[in-house]
Image (cartoon, grey):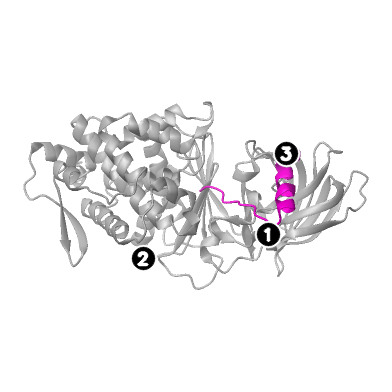
Amino acid sequence: MSKVFQSFLTATLAVLLILQIFNKASAQDIAVEVKIDAEAPVTATVKGRFLPSGLHYKNLSFLREYAGIEGLGERISGLELGNASDNKVPFKMLIPGEYLAEDDFDNWQYKSDLTERKRPASAAHVSWVDGNLGILMLDDLLPQNSAPEKPRTAKLTLNLPPDWKIWTIEKNLGQNVFQIADIEKSVFVIGKDLREVQAGPNLELVLAGQWQFSDTEAANVANEIFSNYVKLFGSAPVRQAQIAIMKFPQKAVQPEMWEADTRGQSVTLISSDMPFKTQSLQRLHEQLRHEIFHLWLPNGVNLSGNYDWFYEGFALYAALKGGVAVNRIRFEDFLDTLSRAYNIDNISGSKTSLIDASKSRWNGANTQIYARGMLVAFLCDLSLLERSKGKTDVSDVLRRIYAEHGFEKPREDGNTAILKILLSYPELVDIVQKNIQGSKKIDWQEHLSAAGIESKEENYTTFLSVTAKPNGRQKEILNKLGYNNWRKLTQN
């Protein structure tokens, strides 16, 4: 979910030049035209200028890495720079994606290769066009010159092949002309074979390809999940959100594979389908429970920095618990997922704190963030339920974070803000110190016992199950976790 962009140059002079980008560019608006050529090799021709005209620039930078996907700067070719008089300005390439002009320039044009990358996971995170379909993530398509603390804005004109359509939440100024409030968060779904379904007053779906489920069924799933999160957080995070559901552009992708990206108000879900309809709908529910959560956290709060451990780990747990609440998964599945997370965390090699792991998420720490982050959310839930006798749980923490750190509030560091709230609950202090700030082994026996859950080990593998005869206090916590939700469904 967070942008990974690290500029590094071996020469000290080059480092200083790159830093100059951020001093001079100051988040100036740009006017840009993007023309898509869908014939192989697929390219985007990009022409633009900084606004207002006449400002002085000598550096041009492009996103070179995102979500562990490298080599993005190498997609740029045919770069030309011009000054206010439209005379060409010579330049040199420092490294792919980083350019230094010999004189001031204020306009530019180049081509970007939009051929899908070999790694299937990239399809949800970076721009691509394949055949009659594509996704444009403006952050990797347009220059990066910006003050990092301010969003880059743009007036964008899109020129597409005949009969192609556009879906986006960006403000439409006219025929294929859009006002972009924040380039980093801007997503465009483009193509011929696209279908739109209104899933609710705040939510629309864009689908491509044929699935085991119908468009209406997908819309109902999305609306159910979105509505449940509105109840959890107390309000909708946006006036309008968009969910794109598409298949991998790469061929021969395994049925179990899927990848998603929630950016701004747009959810991009790239997936293969399952063999049977029930499996397909079940997995769609699982996918959307996780990704729609991100519309609130982290996308609905004014927090910065690498606190992925929280919004990914707690998203996984909220999605898991939410699946039990609506009887999409059994309580046994809930416990089995937590058992597997514990086993993954337990056998991992070198352990670091979740704070440090989030700083290197895309350099091998992704699994730890998801597994350990979810376990920490589970421990917090158990501790809060036990201390409050079932009156407070992790949902109260999520609501509080969303309420206290909305976009109308001052921007704060995510780790600082989240830890401050967690540490305000005395029962969570030990968990925070040992398992978030520290890297101690997860010790959950006391918490599990209070909730009527047993942990057993067989062949070095841990399994969770409900105690044979839970007492009254244990039953209360179990019910809050969703243990008897199936009974409520039967009664209804």
Q: CA distance from mark 2 to mark 3?
A: 55 Å
Q: Residue 132, located in which quarter of the rendered image?
A: bottom right
Q: Amino acid at mark 1?
A: Gly
Q: Position of residue 52 (x, y in %)?
A: 82, 36
Of residues 250 and 352, which is closer to you in this image? 352
- Residue at numbered disc 1: 73
Mark 3 nearby-residue class (10 Å; few <14, some 14–19, many ≥20): few
Magenta range = 1-27
Mark number, residue 305:
none
- x then y, percent, for residue 333: 25, 55
Q: Which of the pair 32/282 is nearer the observer?
A: 32
Could you give the CA–CA distance between mark 3 and mark 1, rounded to whole angstroms? 22 Å
| Residue with the mark numbered 3 | 23
Tags 2 and 1 touching, CB below 8 Å: no
Pointer 2 or 1: first along the chain? 1
Q: Residue at x 48, y 53 (%)?
A: 360
Residue 487 visible, this orientation: no
The dot on residue 276 is 2
- The structure residue drawn at horizontal position 49% and vertical position 73%, both measured from the top left corner, is 252
Mark 1, other Cα within 10 Å: few <14 / some 14–19 / many ≥20: some
Q: Is residue 130 above or below residue 368?
A: below
Q: Earlier in the sequence, mark 3 or mark 1?
A: 3
Classify residue 266 as left or right of residue 462. right
Closer-to-camera residue (347/89): 347
